[in-house]
């Protein structure tokens, strides 16, 4: 049994079976679905877990409850990675009242057949639930990451139950050798990145609270790391670069565009730059997207293909624009044996992105690099520095 505080216990589970989280994200370190129990005169369970882990979670609850019955099940977010075990919970604890907001209850009815006799406690924004020593305050956080999301503040122990916010990829029983930042960035930018404005709103509300512990629905409980995590969330959600880094994202059919991308990387590294290179057909697309958002400069290198651009590059740019890519410097390398259109198409795809600075030097290769194009790559490297 893990203690978060004297009265709050961790009841979550680790998932090492999931192949793709939310159907698209690789999670080599697994995934955690967090749930917590607040032990007081009244007992509250905070959220459930993915349906594949219902029994393991119920066993965790039983160990914590030690024969007691929970009074409340609080549902902060209805996405199935957290709501998937509500039905099973109510089979075991039919007398527990479910506490959530009107939007979430509406979604509950869409996802499952709620037992007719279940007690529902509908809370409003700013509403409270008294447990004894603890009083929970519910703060609505729409679109962080779905419209029904709310977070919960416990003033007595200065704990914020933050729903998806401050979550990360990775199971809690697996140490991440890269620390919290990389997988938290890949998680935030991939899943919540579109909703920067709403996250900024939540950060403003959180700034007014004294928070000593953050209990997210994924990843580790945060205590001394809170300041660092909030600082990163502020940068990511305001679309400001976090790192002085060049991300080079390329696609290559026969290796010539790859040669150009790698030559540019070499030139930049010779100048001491932090450079990350991604082959969009083979590397993790979510990692490439996260790197583009974390860094301040992005190079797109691709071929003209069927009068368009190579499909993996089209998909990559769409991932950027749907997450409001902005405030960055962008350079392009295009390759085409005849009728090159890649630069024009990529520029068009980015035309609604705010505050992008396009480099003066862009490189056009007509099949394989010759000396002239190598010189252009060197000039682009100079400009990017
Ligand atoms: Fe972890 Fe939006 O669910």
Image (cartoon, rainbow, N blue to C red):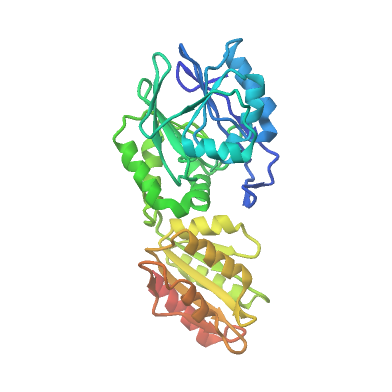
Q: Position of residue 181 (x, y in %)?
A: 47, 45
Question: 309 or 194, which lies in front?
Answer: 194
Examine the rendered structure and indicate whether residue 279 appears above or below residue 149: below
> Which residue appears at 35% of the width and 32% of the height?
126
| Numbered circles on residues, count | 0
> Which residue appears at 57% of the width and 36% of the height?
108
Q: Is residue 171 visible?
A: no
- Image quadrant where residue 382 sits: bottom left
Q: Is residue 210 visible?
A: yes
Q: Is residue 120 left or right of residue 138?
A: right
Q: Quadrant of ligand 1?
A: top right
Question: 103 or 25, which lies in front?
Answer: 103
Q: Position of residue 248 (x, y in %)?
A: 51, 66
Examine the rendered structure and indicate whether residue 6 appears above or below residue 326: above
Quarter of the C terminus within the rendering: bottom left
> Which residue appears at 46% of the width and 66% of the height?
298
Question: 274 or 242, which lies in front?
Answer: 242
Q: Position of residue 263 (x, y in %)?
A: 54, 73
Examine the rendered structure and indicate whether residue 206 appears above or below residue 90: below
Quarter of the N terminus within the rendering: top right
Q: Position of residue 373 (x, y in %)?
A: 52, 84
């Amino acid at each position: 049994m893990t203690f978060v505080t004297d009265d709050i216990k961790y009841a979550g589970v680790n998932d090492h079976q999931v192949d793709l989280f939310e159907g698209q994200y690789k999670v080599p370190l697994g995934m955690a679905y967090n749930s917590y129990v607040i032990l007081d005169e009244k007992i509250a369970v905070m959220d459930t877990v993915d349906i594949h882990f219902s029994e393991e979670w119920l066993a965790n609850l039983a160990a914590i409850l030690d024969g007691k019955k929970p009074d409340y099940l609080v549902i902060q977010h209805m996405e199935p990675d957290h709501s998937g075990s509500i039905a099973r919970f109510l089979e075991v604890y039919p007398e527990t009242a479910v506490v959530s907001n009107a939007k979430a209850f509406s979604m509950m009815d869409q996802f499952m057949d709620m037992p007719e006799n279940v007690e529902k406690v509908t809370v409003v924004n700013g509403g409270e639930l008294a447990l004894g020593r603890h009083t929970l305050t519910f703060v609505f956080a729409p679109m962080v990451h779905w419209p029904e999301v709310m977070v919960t503040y416990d003033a007595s122990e200065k704990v914020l139950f933050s729903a998806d916010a401050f979550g990360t990829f990775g199971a809690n029983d697996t140490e991440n050798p890269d620390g919290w930042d990389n997988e938290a960035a890949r998680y935030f930018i991939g899943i919540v990145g579109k909703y920067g404005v709403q996250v900024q709103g939540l950060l403003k509300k959180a700034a007014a609270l004294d928070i000593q512990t953050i209990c997210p629905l994924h990843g580790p409980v945060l205590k001394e790391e809170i300041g660092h995590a909030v600082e990163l969330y502020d940068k990511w959600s305001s679309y400001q670069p976090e790192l002085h880094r060049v991300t080079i994202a390329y696609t290559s059919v026969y290796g010539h565009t790859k040669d150009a991308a790698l030559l540019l990387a070499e030139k930049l590294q010779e100048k001491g730059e932090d450079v990350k290179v991604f082959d969009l057909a083979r590397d993790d697309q979510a990692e490439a997207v996260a790197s583009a958002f974390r860094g301040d400069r992005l190079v797109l290198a691709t071929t003209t293909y069927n009068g368009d651009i190579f499909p993996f590059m089209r998909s990559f740019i769409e991932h950027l624009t749907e997450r409001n890519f902005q405030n960055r410097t962008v350079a392009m390398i295009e390759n085409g044996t005849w009728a090159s259109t890649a630069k024009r198409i990529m520029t068009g795809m980015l035309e609604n992105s705010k505050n992008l600075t396009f480099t003066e030097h862009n490189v056009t290769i007509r099949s394989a690099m010759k000396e002239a194009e190598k010189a252009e790559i060197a000039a682009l490297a100079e400009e990017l520095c």
